[in-house]
Image (tube, rainbow, N blue to C red):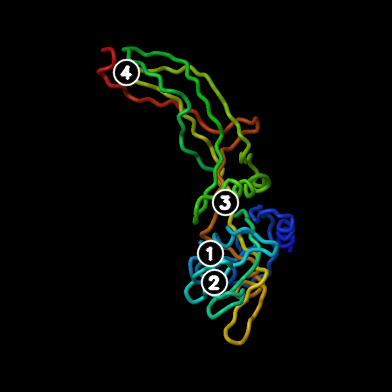
Amino acid sequence: MKLVSGLKKWAVAGVSAALAVTGLMATSGTAHAATGPGGATNIRGVDPGNTDLMIERLCNQKTSLTGVYGALNVDTGEFKTRDEYLRDVFGLWKPAGPWELFRGWCGYAESSTWSIKGEPVRTSRWIGNRGSADDKETFVSSYSTKTFAKKSVGGEISLSLAKSIFTGGVGGSAGYEWGWEKESRFETRSEKTIPPCRQVAVTWTPYQRVVRVNPIFYVEDYQWNKGGGDVTTHTWRGRDASWKTIYSYGYYIDGVSDKILPNGQPDGREDKIEEKLDPKTCTS
C-alpha cells in the first residue's frame, strides 16, 4: 500500500497532510462498492449525516504522527474531531454508545479534468471618439495569467493547501500545458477603428483548465462498542476490503488555471468591445 507508507513518511518528516496523492491504490472490492478516485469508495448517501462536510472537517485537521482522527455518531450522523469528542462526549479516546471512532490518513486524488472559457477581462483603457467620422487609435493591451482554487464545501481553501495539491504532477499528467503557478504575461499594441460617438476597449478571454480532486481517507483503524467490548477493524465501519479507502462524492476541490501555449504565451482570444457615448457630448 504505497499511499499509506507515503503518508506516514510525510507525517514523520513533519510535512502537512495537504500533500497531493495522485497514484491509484489497489483495492479488492465487491460489486456493490463502486471504485472512485484513488480507488476510494463513496460513502455519500450510504452513511448517515453530511459526509461531504465530515470529510472536509476530518481532513482539514493538522496531521499528527499517527494520522488524523474522527468520531461519527451512527444514529444522528454527527461528526466530531478528536478534541471535540474528548471534550463533549467522553474523556477517553474510546467508542461509546452510537459513537464510532476512526484514525487514518488523508490524501487528494485527481478525479476529472476539462477545459473552459474564462470570463472576459478588459485589458486596455477605454478610448472614445466624439467626432462625426471614424477614428483610428493604438491600443495597449496587457494581461497576466490567473490561478485559483475553490472547494465545494467548507470555507475558502488556503493558498498553501492549493499549492501542495496542484503544483507539479497533478495537472501535468493530463496531457495539456497546466499553467498552475507558471505565470505568463503579455503586452500588445494594435490599431483599431473607433466609430463616431463610440468608445472602444480591448478584452481578453482566457482559455482555462480545471482539475478536480477528491479528498480521500485511508482507514488505519475503526472502532465501535455495542455493549460487548471494543471492536477494532481496519476498514470503514468494518466492511470488506473495498472500504479501506473512502471519499464523499460531493466534496471536491477544483484548481483552475489559464492554459499556456507551447511558446509560453497565455492561450485565449482578444476582442474589441464598443459602447455608445452620450450623443450630447459628440459632434453632430
Position above or below: 107 against 265 = below
Taking the spot 70% from the left edge, 64% from the top edge, the residue there is: 26
Q: What's the mark number on residue 54?
A: 1
Callout 1–callout 4 Cβ contact below 8 Å: no
Quadrant holding the N terminus: bottom right
x, y percent for residue 87: 54, 70
Horizontal placement of 74 versus 63: left or right? left
- Name the kind of residue labelled 2 in the image: Leu
Give the structural element (helix, strand or loop) at label 3: strand
At mark 4, the secondary structure is loop
Find residue 197 and name its label.
Answer: 4
Are there few (<14), some (14-19), or many (20+) residues within 10 Å of tag 4? many
Q: Nearer the viewer, residue 147 or 204?
A: 147
Mark earlier in primary sequence (4, 3)? 4
| Disc ID at residue 212 | 3
Q: Position of residue 154 (x, y in %)?
A: 50, 56
| Mark closer to the observer (1, 4) | 1
Which residue of the protein is positioned furthest toward the bottom in this rendering?
Answer: 228
- Residue behind mark 2: 72
| Disc number lying in front (4 or 2) | 2
